[in-house]
Image (cartoon, rainbow, N blue to C red):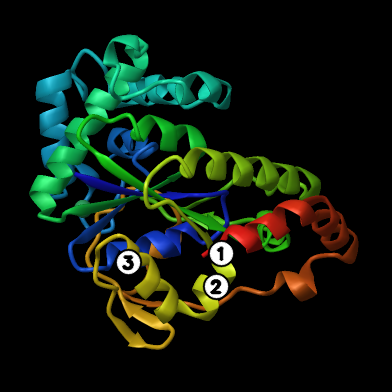
Amino acid sequence: MHLVFVAGWMRSGTTVLAELLGSSPGALAVGELATMWMALERDDLCSCGQSVRSCPVWSVVAAEVAEIHDIGPGRATSYAKFDGELHAVLRMKRLPGLRRLRRSTPDRMPSDVGRITAVMQTVLRVVTDVSECDVIVDSSKRPTALVVFGLIPGVELTPIHLVRDPRAVAYSESRHRQWAGVEAHLAPPGRGALLSAVNWIVTTILCHRVGRRFPGYRLLRYERLTTQPTETMAAVTGGLGLAPPQFVAPDAVQLAPSHVVNGNPSRFGGRLRKISADERWRTDLPARERVTVGVLTAPVRLAVKLLAR
Ligand SMILES: [Zn+2]
């Protein structure tokens, strides 16, 4: 089983990258495996158009997870309870301890980590079997999920770490966003530019430090992806042993069917994905915030430029 893990901070284009990767022949985008359990609990809409529990992929996952791990409605552990168990393991304060774990020494694995990796192994096995795709694309983003999913037995994990200019991220975070779901609702208000910059720095450094341990790790800049999409996707998919997605224009891809159960509402759009750089921050982010975020993040931005490929 091959899992491509899209890592990075929020509002960085991870959804678009996952959609593009998932549109490569032999690959399937499934959204955020770290947050799929509440989608199962609520029976949200899958990007295939069916509700999650009726979806041809996730319904089989649900049946197997119930049978093998006793998780699901009327079972020993509800989806919501398992979501709680998973997020207890994925808390940032667990990261140092998680990084010391090795797949080769399962006897040293804490029981809660062992249970999460066993369940996720079942999920990946079923998704791989039912979809008949060799590569599963997950966009769980956060470094703790990257470490824990790297401990799943029998899974080859390749992280693609997407980094966007933090001033664009701060601008995007300052705006409200509407999420799509069974019932659309407004996401919480954005955080301040300073907090956004600090989060960007911490997440960028941690994703890089964790990700570079895995073979095939790639640090990729959003600006390169959106200004040279064809060349960039050819390089990224080539590194993964995949053919690139089908570009119908230099900046547009015909998206393949996917089974994404959560994430950004853009996935519910048409089957044609236009790729363009969102540069509104250059004119619309207030000058004071632009300078604050720019100065604070300058050393890490420089490092990203030097290390990205
Ligand atoms: Zn589906």
Q: Amino acid at mark 3?
A: Thr
**Badge 1 is on which residue?**
221
Q: Relative to 291, does residue 117 appear above or below in the rendering?
A: above
**Badge 2 is on which residue?**
224
Q: Amino acid at mark 1?
A: Arg
Distance between the Cα atoms at labels 3 and 1?
15 Å
User: Residue 237, labelled with which disc?
Assistant: 3
Q: Are marks 2 and 1 in contact (CB under 8 Å)?
A: yes
Q: Position of residue 61 (x, y in %)?
A: 16, 37
Cβ of mark 3 under 8 Å from ligand 1: the answer is no
Earlier along the polypeptide chain: callout 2 or callout 3? 2
Q: Is residue 268 visible?
A: no
Distance between the Cα atoms at labels 2 and 3?
15 Å
Give the left or right position of residue 241, taking residue 293 as reference. Answer: left
* Element carrying mark 2: helix
* x 26%, y 68%: residue: 24
Give the left or right position of residue 57, taking residue 243 as reference. Answer: left
Earlier along the polypeptide chain: callout 3 or callout 1? 1
Q: Amino acid at mark 2?
A: Arg
Cβ of mark 2 under 8 Å from ligand 1: the answer is no
